[in-house]
Image (cartoon, rainbow, N blue to C red):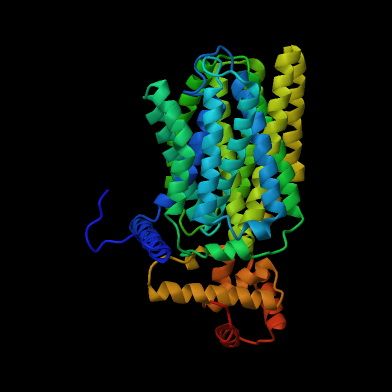
């Protein structure tokens, strides 16, 4: 190609400046999209959920076999890789927090997940039936999708509980939409889209490149986690195992077509459930979420219900669909609780969410492996009924005595969502956000308990003891006792002195 007179090749510095300019333009474009549609970035979790739904059900990519054993193999190996990766994230949370919100790290995870998905799809019996490549694909997809999930943890951990639950419901609805859109496409087209879902997820996550909701804070904080959180993890693992045992036991001997049919039915029912949850959150805005009751119902009553149904109607499509619905709802409740704890404790989102989802994964692995052993060893149905009944009893004991509704409510303390930081340049919002930071700093410096910190923040905003009692569902005598304790620890004698103390607190911006 001839160069025009006066043209010359670009030097290294000029090339670097050109690349920097292009990167700046891309960053500006993404930031503009995020400002105009800030909810789009959370749809990255919806793509992640859609990938798991398609992968574990065998939809689209597993249509040329007569057994669902391959999708169960995918689940066990994939979740094992997820569990190991999650535990590594939790163990090295301080280092992981420095990179988990970076777009380069997110896209790297997406590329790994896409490579693994391609291996999963092409190693079908009709294309390239090599078991080693299939299991490698399961491992790569597990590592890659876990990276994307941790990116979601950093985003959702900054949301107030009501907002997080509502956004989770919207993400679930988006994943259902993706499933039905692909369900209407030819299998080849749907399989290609399935392999690209991790990249789409990374794109949505990359829209949020600004620290508009304190994302840096929930990634850097290293707050000690209470011991009762370990009890929650055991409860999550046990209930996850119970639900997955029923689902795997029913599906493992069914053809993929039946699995896809039951999944489609479940997805259709979930549309109404998620819409109901979103509507309930909007109507209950400003009141306390009763996660104790919600978790107890999801982990106890519904688990036992599906156990009873399965014992009397084994391996039916209806029971399989019910299993999918309950698993999806239970996972959503667990994620909402984990985000609640991150918001309440101001804890490191990577560590809390990684440990919680690792408990979910480990429970599912144990149950799926047990169901596969039943299939390969030709264990009789009577033996499996005994095992299922035993697991159901264990869940009942857990819900009633080990991690009851009361204990959950003691773990998930009421939080004030009226001071949730909002994006934009609203001076009042910024002032409220700064006041919340100062309250947190005072509570930490004076070693107030979590409950005392909530009461102190409410007092500083001018609320009376009776208003605090009504809002936090406490007796007025308890509020007065907390008030006396707060005044003693802070060495103040009135609300005015309390406000002056908080106003003079220095916080890092």
Coordinates of residue 491 in the picture (x, y in percent): 69, 86
x and y, in percent, of residue 173 in the image: 43, 39
Give the quarter of the image for residue 400.
Answer: top right
Tell me residue 239's x, y (percent). Answer: 68, 36
Give the residue drawn at x 43%, y 65%: 422
> Is 189 situated left or right of 337 in this image?
left
Image quarter for residue 470? bottom right
Q: Residue at x 40, y 28 (%)?
A: 182
Q: In the displayed image of the protein, which residue is found farthest to the left? A: 5
| Vertical comparison of 30 with 302: above or below | below
Whether residue 107 is situated above or below residue 178 in the rendered picture? below
Q: How many marks?
A: 0
Q: Nearer the viewer, residue 125 or 292?
A: 125
User: Do we see residue 319 in this rendering?
Assistant: yes
**Quarter where residue 217 is shown:** bottom right
Q: Is residue 277 above or below residue 417?
A: above
Q: Name the foreground residue: 157 vs 290.
A: 157
In the image, taking residue 292 as reference, residue 262 lies left or right, namely left
- Residue 271 at x, y = what percent? 43, 35
Q: Is residue 420 left or right of residue 409?
A: left
Q: Is residue 294 visible?
A: no
| Residue at horizontal 72 percent and vertical 26 percent from the top | 369
Q: Nearer the viewer, residue 44 or 22?
A: 22
């Amino acid at each position: 190609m001839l160069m025009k007179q006066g043209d010359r090749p670009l030097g290294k510095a000029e090339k670097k400046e050109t690349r920097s300019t292009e990167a700046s333009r891309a960053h500006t474009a993404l930031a503009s999209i995020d400002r105009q549609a800030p909810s789009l970035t959370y749809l990255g979790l919806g793509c992640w959920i859609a990938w798991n739904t398609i992968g574990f059900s065998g939809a689209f990519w597993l249509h040329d076999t007569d057994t669902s054993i391959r999708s169960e193999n995918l689940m066990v190996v994939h979740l094992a890789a997820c569990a190991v990766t999650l535990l590594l994230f939790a163990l090295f949370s301080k280092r992981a927090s420095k990179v988990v919100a970076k777009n380069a790290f997110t896209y790297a995870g997406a590329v790994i997940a896409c490579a693994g998905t391609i291996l999963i799809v092409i190693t079908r019996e009709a294309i390239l039936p090599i078991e080693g490549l299939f299991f490698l694909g399961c491992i790569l997809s597990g590592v890659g999708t876990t990276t994307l999930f941790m990116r979601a943890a950093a985003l959702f951990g900054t949301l107030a509980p009501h907002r997080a639950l509502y956004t989770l419901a919207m993400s679930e609805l988006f994943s259902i939409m993706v499933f039905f859109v692909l369900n209407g496409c030819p299998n080849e087209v749907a399989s290609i889209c399935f392999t690209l879902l991790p990249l789409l997820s990374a794109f949505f996550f990359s829209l949020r490149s600004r620290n508009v909701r304190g994302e840096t804070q929930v990634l850097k904080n290293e707050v000690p986690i209470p011991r009762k959180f370990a009890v929650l993890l055991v409860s999550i693992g046990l209930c996850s195992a119970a639900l997955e045992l029923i689902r795997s036991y029913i599906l493992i001997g069914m053809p993929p077509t039946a699995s896809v049919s039951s999944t489609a039915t479940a997805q259709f029912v979930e549309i109404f459930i998620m819409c109901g949850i979103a509507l309930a959150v909007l109507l209950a805005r400003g009141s306390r979420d009763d996660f104790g009751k919600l978790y107890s119902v999801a982990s106890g009553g519904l688990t036992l219900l599906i156990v009873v149904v399965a014992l009397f109607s084994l391996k039916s499509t209806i029971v399989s669909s019910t299993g999918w619905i309950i698993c999806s709802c239970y996972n959503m409740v667990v994620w909402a609780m984990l985000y609640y704890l991150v918001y309440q404790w101001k804890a490191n989102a990577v560590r809390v969410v990684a440990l919680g989802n690792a408990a979910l994964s480990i429970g599912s692995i144990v149950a799926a492996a047990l169901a596969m052993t039943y299939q390969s060893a030709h264990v009789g149905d009577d033996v499996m009924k005994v095992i299922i009944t035993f697991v159901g009893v264990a869940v009942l004991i857990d819900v009633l005595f080990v991690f009851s509704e009361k204990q959950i409510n003691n773990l998930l303390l009421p939080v004030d969502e009226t001071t949730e930081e909002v994006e934009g340049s609203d001076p009042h919002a910024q002032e409220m956000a700064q006041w919340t930071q100062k309250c947190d700093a005072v509570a930490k410096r004076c070693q107030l308990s979590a409950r005392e910190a909530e009461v102190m923040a409410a007092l500083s905003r001018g609320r009376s003891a009776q208003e605090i009692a009504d809002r936090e569902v406490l007796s007025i005598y308890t509020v007065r006792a907390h008030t006396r304790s707060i005044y003693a620890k802070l060495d103040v004698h009135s609300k005015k002195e309390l406000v002056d103390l908080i106003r003079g607190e220095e916080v890092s911006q």
